[in-house]
């Protein structure tokens, strides 16, 4: 009876060990399947983020390339406009505003080595104050 009991205990232990191995394999299979699904989802999310970031960088680089191409054009245009304004300002005479007339805009004549200004018709001689000093001035007619 001892042998059969020992044999039965061994068989029972072997079957329980096999059953435990089967249960353990099933649990490990479920666990690895769950981990695989989580990792697959996480990797898909990371791949999506990388793709979106790459697209944004590509878009930003395209805009930067466009801006860098036209930056030189804008710089050259600014230089040309600035040069044109300086030229116009220097051709305008005394550097006054565009509506202001200079002495070269009026007729002059020279007699006995002296230069005289021909005052336009309709002008009027007036006295002006320059600071605290009174000076003679000419009031030009309207439209001059």
Image: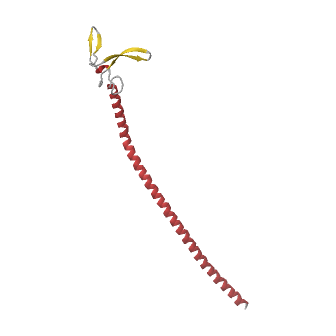
* Residue at horizontal 60 percent and vertical 78 percent from the top: 23
Badge count: 0
Residue 126 pos. (x, y %): 35, 16
Q: Position of residue 68 (x, y in %)?
A: 39, 43
Q: Residue at x 52, y 69 (%)?
A: 37
Q: Compare residues 86 and 75 and report the one nearer the observer.
A: 86
Q: Nearer the viewer, residue 13 or 87?
A: 87
Q: Residue 108 location in percent, x, y? A: 27, 16
Towards the viewer: 3 or 32: 32
Residue visible at 65% across and 82% down in the picture: 16
Residue lying furthest right in this view? 2
Of all residues, the one furthest to the top in this rendering is 112
Up the image or down, 116 lies above or below 26; here it is: above
Residue 118: which quarter of the image?
Answer: top left
**Would residue 18 appear left or right of 94 to someone viewing this image?**
right
Determine the residue positioned at 35% across, 37% down.
77
* Quadrant for the N terminus in the image: bottom right
Identify the image's colour scheme: rainbow, by chain, secondary structure or one colour: secondary structure
- Percent coordinates x, y for residue 104 in the rendering: 30, 20
Q: Quadrant of residue 13?
A: bottom right
Q: Is residue 73 left or right of residue 111?
A: right
**Quadrant in which the C terminus is drawn:** top left
- Quarter of the image for residue 31 reads bottom right
């Amino acid at each position: 009876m001892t042998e059969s009991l020992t044999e039965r205990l061994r068989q029972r232990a072997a079957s329980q060990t096999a059953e435990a191995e089967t249960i353990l394999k099933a649990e490990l299979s479920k666990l690895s399947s769950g981990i695989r699904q989580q990792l697959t989802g996480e990797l898909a999310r990371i791949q999506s983020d990388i793709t979106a970031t790459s697209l944004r960088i590509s878009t930003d680089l395209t805009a930067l390339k466009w801006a860098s191409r036209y930056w030189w054009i804008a710089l050259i245009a600014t230089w040309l406009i600035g040069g044109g304004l300086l030229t116009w300002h220097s051709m305008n005479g005394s550097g006054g505003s565009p509506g202001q007339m200079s002495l070269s805009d009026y007729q002059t004549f020279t007699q006995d080595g002296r230069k005289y200004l021909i005052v336009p018709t309709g002008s009027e001689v007036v006295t002006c104050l320059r600071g605290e000093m009174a000076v003679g001035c000419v009031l030009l007619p309207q439209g001059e």
